[in-house]
Amino acid sequence: MSDPDVHLRKFQKELSTGTVSLALLAVLARAPEPMYGYLIAKELERVGDGVLSGKQSALYPVLRNLEGAGLLESHVEPSVAGPPRRYYRINDDGRAALRQWIAAWTATRDSVESVLEGIN
Amino acid sequence: MNNDIHARPLPTTIPEYLEQLRAALAGADPAMIQDALYDAEEYLRSELAEQAGKSEAEVIAGVAGSYGAPEEVAEIYRETEVTVNRALRAPGPAARSAPVAPALAATAAAAAAAPARPRSWLARFFGVVLDPHTYGALFYMLLSLATGIFFFSWVVTGLSLSMSLLILIIGIPVLLLFLGSVRVLSLVEGRIIETMLGVRMPRRPAYTDRSQGWTVRIGTMFTDSRTWLTMLYFLLMLPLGVAYFSIATTLLSLSLALVFAPLAELLFDQPVGIWIDGVNVAGALWLWPLTVLVGVLLLFATLHLARGIGKVHGAMAKHLLVRL
């Protein structure tokens, strides 16, 4: 277990659990129209770095969970490219949750940064 | 986690990729496998449509980096499912009945290492009231009369209508529409079962290989055992629904009547008792506490029965509706 890579991966995994949900909600809150899984994944890939650049297959279960938690709404539309796509849209509960999450995130980020200050 | 990963050459076509993903997920909950295959296919097909110039093999090689190789994807889904199951598990004392498939139960049990404390049989017997699935199952038993009648009539009408119309050419589209509707209804029943009985069922339609022509796909609707098993399930739902409904209403009304019988006598001055051939055998005052006790015990036994039926029915539905 002395391999630093192991520690890094474990840290990244724990870091990503909450932040991925936050990022997904944020992407959908900014989107003018409903988006489906692939588009959301590509949007995150475009801006993403760090833990958000992880494997995109991890996003789908999180989307389903957010929908199950009542923060997203979805509908299915047929597509020419493959199976019918599920389009996700953020609802009012989701926006309320996002506002709280952003506040929590900002507070955490600021305090973590102030703790990290001074370490080269 | 505890599944070994075999390093295999990357697949070159989308069906191959999905086949590898299915193989990597072997042993996991079939409902989860169905969802995972659906997600993967959506991503792969979208990527392929996006990069029109490239070949399928090139696209998949790129996808292995962004979406993940089949083994990696399988790993991610297994882990997420364990986390979600743990999060969804009700904290009530009767929550040890978490709906995990045997393969996942092993990992989930290892993850949630805290063993359930052994409880007295008394706590177990009365703890059933705290389990939300008890009421879900009870409601499902009452609802199943309606859904059972609907499913049964749908299948019988659809089958006989399309069979008899097959003589004319119009029977073919009717039959195909009917088969499609059975798939949709199977998904709907799955959602009902997952909500009320807590058994993990698919949230996405079953995977169909789109690289084949539509004639082949129609053919697989007939050869797919799931189509016929789903119809069998829908036919079974009528007798089962009638039985569930009768059991639930009879036992509930009997036990509640026993519990509240003394109250009726005291408050409303109604003669209370158990009549056999016109003779009241339970009119004595000392029998009243006994009737209440029997009623309470019967009520709790009914709740246990409902939960048991819910579990058995969930397992049966999973066998007939989700097969890969």
Image (cartoon, rainbow, N blue to C red):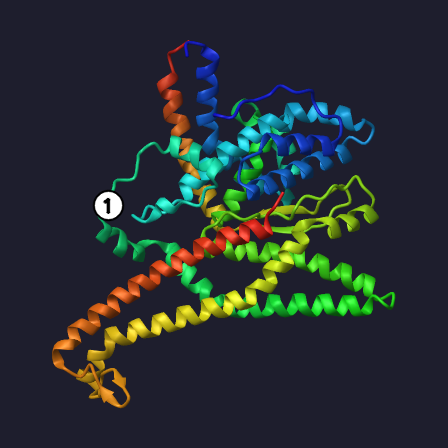
Q: Amino acid at mark 1?
A: Arg
Horizontal arrangement in the rendering, residue B76 relative to residue B105 (left or right): right
Report the residue at 62% width, 59% height from top.
Answer: B232
Image coordinates for residue B186, horizontal then vertical, percent: 61, 56
Figure quadrant of the N terminus of chain A: top left
Report the residue at 25% width, 82% height from top.
Answer: B274
Instruction: Using the image as rendered, state which of residue B300 and residue A73 is in the foreground.
Output: B300
Which chain is indicated by disc 1? B
Q: Compared with residue A15, is residue B311 higher up or lower down, i.e. above or below?
A: below
Judge the density around disc 1: few (<14), some (14-19), many (≥20) Cα neighbours within 10 Å. few
Q: Compared with residue B32, is residue B306 higher up or lower down, i.e. above or below?
A: below
Instruction: Using the image as rendered, state which of residue A98 and residue B127 is in the foreground.
Output: B127
Residue found farthest to the front: B277
One can see residue A2 in this view: yes
Instruction: Using the image as rendered, state which of residue B187 and residue B156 is in the foreground.
Output: B156
The answer to which image quadrant residue B280 occupies is bottom left
Image coordinates for residue B58, horizontal then vertical, percent: 76, 24
The answer to which image quadrant residue A55 occupies is top right
Image coordinates for residue B188, horizontal then vertical, percent: 58, 57
Figure quadrant of the C terminus of chain A: top left
Q: Compared with residue B230, is residue B200 higher up or lower down, i.e. above or below?
A: above
Figure disc tally: 1
One can see residue A71 in this view: no
Image coordinates for residue B78, horizontal then vertical, percent: 51, 33
Horizontal arrangement in the rendering, residue A94 relative to residue B302 (left or right): right
Q: Which residue is mark 1?
A: B119
Q: Compared with residue A4, is residue A87 higher up or lower down, i.e. above or below?
A: below
Report the residue at 65% width, 67% height from top.
Answer: B154
